[in-house]
Image: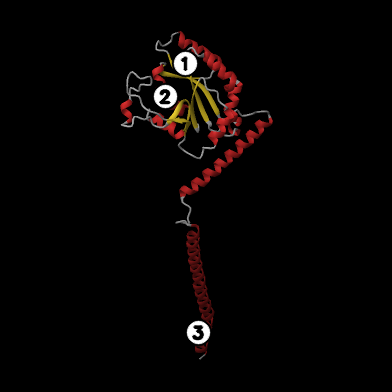
Amino acid sequence: MQCRRSSVRIVGMAFQSRIPILVISMFAIFASLFVAGRLWQDAESRVYLAKELDRMMGQGKSVISVDDSWKILGCREQLKKLSALEMDLATARQKGFVSNYLPEMNKTPKKNPLVVIGILTGFGRKNEREAIRNAWMGTGAALTKMEDNKGIIVRFVIGRSSNRGDSLDRSIDSENKQTNDFFILENHIEAPEELPNKTKLFFAHAAESWDADYYAKFNDDVYVNIDALGNILAAHLNQPRVYIGCMKSGDVFSESGEKWYEPDWWKFGDGKTYFRHASGEMLVISKALAKFVSINR
């Protein structure tokens, strides 16, 4: 009897000891499920926020790739080097170092010339050239000042002698060494009948040598009011194709015995009238027309 009571007591004590274990186990299971659920919700929230961030920023991915990481590290290294160089430069400046490149960087961009004037001249006309230099063109510093302040470039235009290198060529070269105001057409032979070709070559080569708004051709007996010319040209800058001069026309003479005989009279059609054109003493064309002449020379 006593043994049975003792065994019942042992069973009861064992049952009572299992209850706390079951409670603790159930609590642990519920706690695990709760934590797992929160973690799952947090993961979903992070994914949702990442997608929303990508959508708002217009990016297709929210994870930084290995390449991007290397780029970021590279940028940081470059920034460190740049900071070190800036410190070295500051130290050098304190010691009196001045870079040769700084003045070039600080210069304002140079404006394009307003006009390039070619004064067609010839051999044996030095007196006419000197008169123009003294009257309105200037020489040396005055010529440079007109180029810098007014954007007006002036050069005497001349070709070469038919006997290349003779005294005529040498006299022009000698004069040019003193004045430095010639534009020599090396492939053009000076001759009265070649004046139209000389004008064409000047416009073509000038358009290649200077990026100006206008190009002008004057004879070496024309005296120019530079300020008035500059004002007239500036007033037409908004027009891309400009042809300025003393415009004229007239009959074409087809008879060989006439004073103004035109060998190419047949090019002008039945009317035999010259197209309206500028008189040869002076004329101005805009950049577009000069480029056209250069391309189609």
Side (left or right) of 94 relative to 230: right
Q: Residue at x 58, y 24 (%)?
A: 144
Q: From this view, report whether residue 111 is shown above or below residue 141.
A: below
Q: Residue type at mark 2: give it.
A: Leu
Q: Position of residue 273 (x, y in %)?
A: 36, 30
Q: Residue type at mark 1: give it.
A: Gly
In primary-sequence order, the first of circles 1 and 2 is: 1
Q: Quadrant of the C terminus?
A: top left
Q: Residue furthest bottom?
A: 1
Q: Residue at x 61, y 37 (%)?
A: 84
Residue 122 is labelled as 1
Of 172 and 275, the residue lying toward us: 275
Instruction: Locate residue 105: give its quadrant.
Output: top right
Q: Position of residue 225 (x, y in %)?
A: 57, 27
Does any portion of residue 208 appear in the rendered image?
no
Q: From this view, report whether residue 276 is shown above or below residue 68.
A: above
CA gap between label 1 and label 3 equals 138 Å
Q: Comparing marks 1 and 3, which lies closer to the viewer? A: 1
Of 199 and 67, the residue lying toward us: 199
In primary-sequence order, the first of circles 3 and 2 is: 3
Does any portion of residue 54 appear in the rendered image?
yes
- Residue bearing the label numbered 2: 201
Q: Residue at x 41, y 25 (%)?
A: 200
Q: How many marks?
A: 3
Q: Position of residue 181 (x, y in %)?
A: 53, 19
Q: Element under label 1?
A: loop
Q: Element under label 3?
A: helix
Q: From this view, report whether residue 7 is shown above or below residue 217.
A: below
- Residue bearing the label numbered 3: 11
Q: Residue type at mark 3: give it.
A: Val
